[in-house]
Image (cartoon, rainbow, N blue to C red):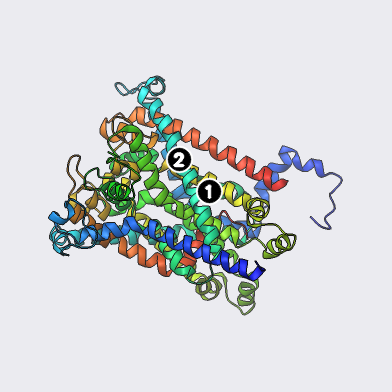
Amino acid sequence: MGGEVLHPLFPLYFYPAKGVERILIKLTRDEKVAYKMILPYAVLIVTLVIFLLITNVINSFKSPSDGAFTFQNYINCFTDPVVGRAMWNTVIWVLGSVVGQLSLGLLVALLLNQSTKGQIIFRSLILILPWATLDIVAGVMWKWMYNDMYGVLNDLLMKMHLISDYIPWLATENMAMLAVIIANIWKGFCLSGMFFLAGLQTIPTQLYEAAEIDGAGVFRRFWNITIPQLKPVIMTTLMLTTIWTINYFPLIYIMTGGGPGYGTETVVTYIYKLGFKFLDFNKSAALSNILFVIIFLIAFAFLKSISKEEVR
Amino acid sequence: MTRSQRRKFQKTITYIVLIFLSIIITFPFLWLVLTAFKTYPDIYAYPLKYFIFSPTLEHFEKIGNMNFWGYFKNSIIVGTGTMLFSILFGIFPAYAFARYNFRGKGFLLSSVMLFQMFPMVVFLVPIFKLLNNIGLLNTYMGLIFSYLPFTTPISIMFMRTFFIKVPKALEEAAKIDGCNFWQAFNKVILPVTLPGIASVGIYAFLFSWSELLYSMSMLTSKAKQTIPTFLSLFVGQYQTRWGPLFAGSILATLPPLIVFMFLQKFFISGLVSGSVKE
């Protein structure tokens, strides 16, 4: 803005007629090039997504029997006890996974940031290995570890005298939920770790040196420098992890299939079941739209608070 | 304690915790590898056998006989296609977002951000029906097409950051020397950003490599299915064939693991670029 003087008739720029005129006539050279470059993406991908969204909306208002317009699919969603259960499970699944992934990610990032020698090896073992493991492989791997008779987890916990009896991990509803959350923390904390590590590397070291000279201990420095400096990254990571966890499907599908009972049924696994097992496409579309609105609201709330933070 | 002593003490603690964490985090995968080399009596041994067992390659032979390499080939076809098309549809928008100011930029950029938040399962049924209507169901092309809404936005975000890092002066110098846009793009920008573009491609490849939900739904004939679908067949409701399942799991995980380890610098810088401002 420097040096630019506002025209006295500046408010006129906002008159609609003038605005339309500007859009119609003045395509700058840059804009012509840019629009040409974006055209394939806009035509194919954006149009496809919009088409899919509209298809879902139309399907969700169609009656499964005669195709007439109806609200019944949404009413069915709200009165279905499984949907309520799935929503509640999703909340727990997201809360547990996100808290676990972010704390473990932060711990690992802090440690890696401190280490000088062997950082690549530690990074490969801790951050890359779980990330590179295929979803289905992670699922079956944990399923085998949780096996109540031959699972290594029970055996190790017994040897360490932490439990006195074998735990049937995937057989009861609460334990199954805990089990899939632990597996998900293992699979997903690497992303938070990478985000945080990149964020830590942007904090100027002078801040720490100054604090150390002033006599601030490790924990004071952590609370008063690291956390505030890292806050924007933490917020973004929190948003992305929350949304990805809501959407994350394969681990639960492989490990429990939503069971036992509906113990680990989340909204996405239920949408899949409605569509592909019960062949109730319309209800599945309705639930999809509900989920979509929820995700949109969460993203909106996060983005708003992030931009507020930036203004401050 | 003096300052340097304290530093040394902190370093030691750091390394002890790091080693401890490495052991815990690699253990599940290590256990999978150990299990894959055990005979069935050793897999179902009680008490558990940790390191003393008779190693065997029988499970690897078994999945080899079950046409594992056929599924491997299918995964490579789908992965390569996803890679090429994600780059093709992503590279020019990424460049435009990095270089030009234009009306609607904000809207289109937020579409790129928003698309990453869509749950894949939400589009499963509509894409399935769309592919069925246009005759692309159970084709590689159809599956690749259904991946593009998810991989292209990420590839745009990645490549955009790589393009932003190329100084504009470099391109202008080429133009002064008489290059037109395409020549400047090919001879100046592409060589500089090639590692970034390659890592985007590999990212898209590995996305499709591990994707289960769409691949098992869109590819209905056995001859065309990919590795994740193949592996999921070993998981039964009452019984799971762990041996061959884990042998296949190792072979399926090795390619992404090796690639990620060698190219971690590029992946991490591309991946975090959206959320960490430097």
For image coordinates 21% across by 59% down, the residue present is: B36
Which of B230/B164 is in front?
Answer: B230
Residue A98 placement (x, y as % from top left): 48, 44
Whether residue B44 is visible to the viewer of this picture, yes or no, is yes
Image: B140 above or below A88: below
Residue holding disc 1: B113
Which of B4/A95 is in front?
Answer: B4
Which of B271/A9 is in front?
Answer: B271
Residue holding disc 2: A96
Which of B145/B262 is in front?
Answer: B262
Q: Is residue A172 left or right of residue A294?
A: left
Image: A60 above or below B211: above
Name the amino acid, label 2.
Gly
For image coordinates 48% across by 60% down, the residue present is: B17
Residue B216 placement (x, y as % from top left): 27, 46
Q: Is residue A55 left or right of residue B170?
A: left
Residue A144 placement (x, y as % from top left): 26, 48
Give residue A56's quadrant in the image.
Answer: top left
